[in-house]
Amino acid sequence: MIEILTNYGDILLEGFINTLIASLIALVISLIIGTLLGIFQVSTNRLLAGLANFYVQLFLNIPLLIIVLFFYVVFPMLFVGVNGFTAGIIGLTIYTSAFIAETVRAGILGVPKGQMEAGLSTGLTYSETMRYIILPQAIKIVIPPLGNQFINLVKNSSVLAMVAGLDLMYYGDLIASETFNTFDTYIIVALFYLIITLPLTYTMQYVERRLAAND
Amino acid sequence: MIEFKDVNKYYGEFHALKNINLSFKKGEVAVVIGPSGSGKSTMLRCINGLEDINEGQLLVNDVDLHAKDTNINSIRKHVGMVFQHFNLYPHMTVLENVTLAPIKVLKQDPKEAKKTAEKLLDKVNMLDKKDSYPTQLSGGQKQRIAIARGLAMNPEVLLFDEPTSALDPETIDDVLDVMKKLAKEGMTMIVVTHEMGFAREVGDRVIFMANGEVIEDRNAREFYENPQDPRAKQFLGKIIHHV
C-alpha cells in the first residue's frame, strides 16, 4: 500500500483534484439549473412546466453512463469534439440537475398551500409570493435531501473513468492494471473518496441540526 | 361594492355555486352561515380570485373580476382575507408578517410600514409580540396578527373564512372582540362563521347557504327570530342547541 502511494502518489493526487473540480463544477451548475427546473415544474405556465417535466423525467430515467457516453462519443460526431473530462462534467450536470429539480419541486410542494393563498390575497404576485414566502420555507425542507444529492454527485463522478476523464477512479484503474495489486489500489481510491464525502456528510448533519433548532 | 350576478361554479361534475346573486355594500357586516359543503367558503374565496367562476359575473368596485384583462392583483390589494388556519409566514417575525405586503405591493417606506404595523398590532392587542415568530404564539394570537396583516393593506373589505373554527375555545373571544371592534368602526366585512353570538351582535345581515345556493338573505335579527326556509330552521336549531 505504501509502495503504491510513493510510486503513484502524484497521479492519485491529480485524479483526486480532478474529481474535486469535476464535482464542484457539476454541483454549482446543476444546483442553478435544477433549482430553476424545479420552480418551472410547479409553474402555472403549462408550457414551461411541461418542458421542465420532460427534461426531468428523461434524465431521471436513463443511466448516467449513457448520458456521459453520448457527450463523449455521439456529440463530437455531430458538433464539436470534447474531451472525457468535459463530457463527464456535462453528463454529471445534466443528470444531477434532474434529481435536484425533483428535490426542489418536492420542497416547494411541501410548503402548505395556504402560504401561497395568504401571499396572493395580500396582493403579492405569484413570483413575489414564491420569492418571499414559498422559497425561503422550501429551502429548509430541501436542504437534507439536497445534501444526499451532493454526496451522490461526488460518487457518481467516478463515471469519468469510463471516458478517460482523468479522475480518481480513472487513475485507480490505471494503477491497478499496472501493479496487479487491485485490492490495495481500490482501498486507497475509496479512502480518497471518503476524504470528500465524509466532511460533506458531517456538514449536512450539522446544518440539519441547526435547522431543526430554529423550528 | 361587490356584486355576484348569476354566478355558477363547478368542480368537475359537482355544482358548487348555483346561480348566486348577491351584493355587498360599503360599511356592511354580512355573516354567511350554512352547513359544511354549502359553498359559503367557495363563495368567499371567489371574491379575491382564489377560486375561479365558470359562469356569470362577479364585480368588485365595478371591475369584472374574472374578465381576461383584469389584473387580479390590483383587486386583491383592496380585498383583505383572514383564513381559518391563519397562514402566517412562519419564517418571519410578527412585524415582518404585517409589513411584507405594504412594502412590496404598496411600496411603502419600510419605516412607515413598521409604524403602521405597530399601530395595528396595538389595535389587536399583540404589540408586545411584534418580534416573536408565529410558532411561539397561540391560535388566537396568530389570528389577531392575521387580521392586522389584512388591515395593513388598508383594504376596502375584509373577508373572514371561518376565523375562529380552528381556535381553542378560550382564545375565540379575543379574536371576536377584535372583529367586533372593526365592525363598529365601519369596516366592510364578509364573515363565514358559526359564531351566532357575533352574527347577532354585529351582523347587519345573514346569508344562509345550503347545497351551493343562497337560501336566505335577510336582516340578522329577523333571520334569527323567524327563519323562513325549513333548512335554515333546522340548521339554527342544531347550532343554538349546541350553544
Image (spheres, rainbow, N blue to C red):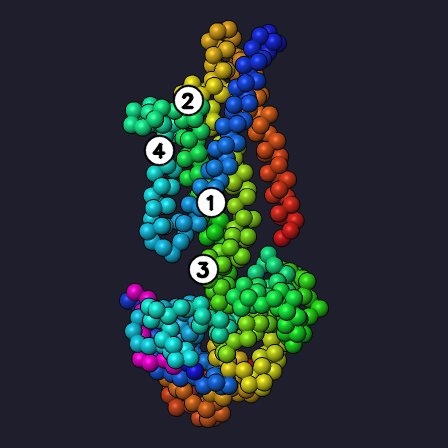
Q: What stretch is highlighted in magenta?
A: B3-12
Depth check: give the residue in front, B51 or B153: B153
Element under disc 1: helix
Q: Which of marks 3 and 2 is nearer the N terminus?
A: 2
> Is residue B213 visible to us here?
no
Quarter location, residue B118: bottom right
Q: What element carries label 3?
A: helix
Which amino acid, by three-letter code, is at mark 1? Thr
Which of disc 4 and disc 3 is earlier in sequence? Answer: 4
Q: Mark 2 lies on which chain?
A: A
Image quarter for residue B92? bottom right
Q: Quick check: marks 1 and 2 in contact, CB under 8 Å?
A: no
Q: On what subunit does the disc labeled 1 rest?
A: A
Cα separation, mark 3 vs mark 2, equals 42 Å
> Is residue B170 shown left or right of residue B107?
right
Type of the residue with mark 3: Tyr
B5 within the magenta span: yes
| Residue at the spot of label 4 | A62
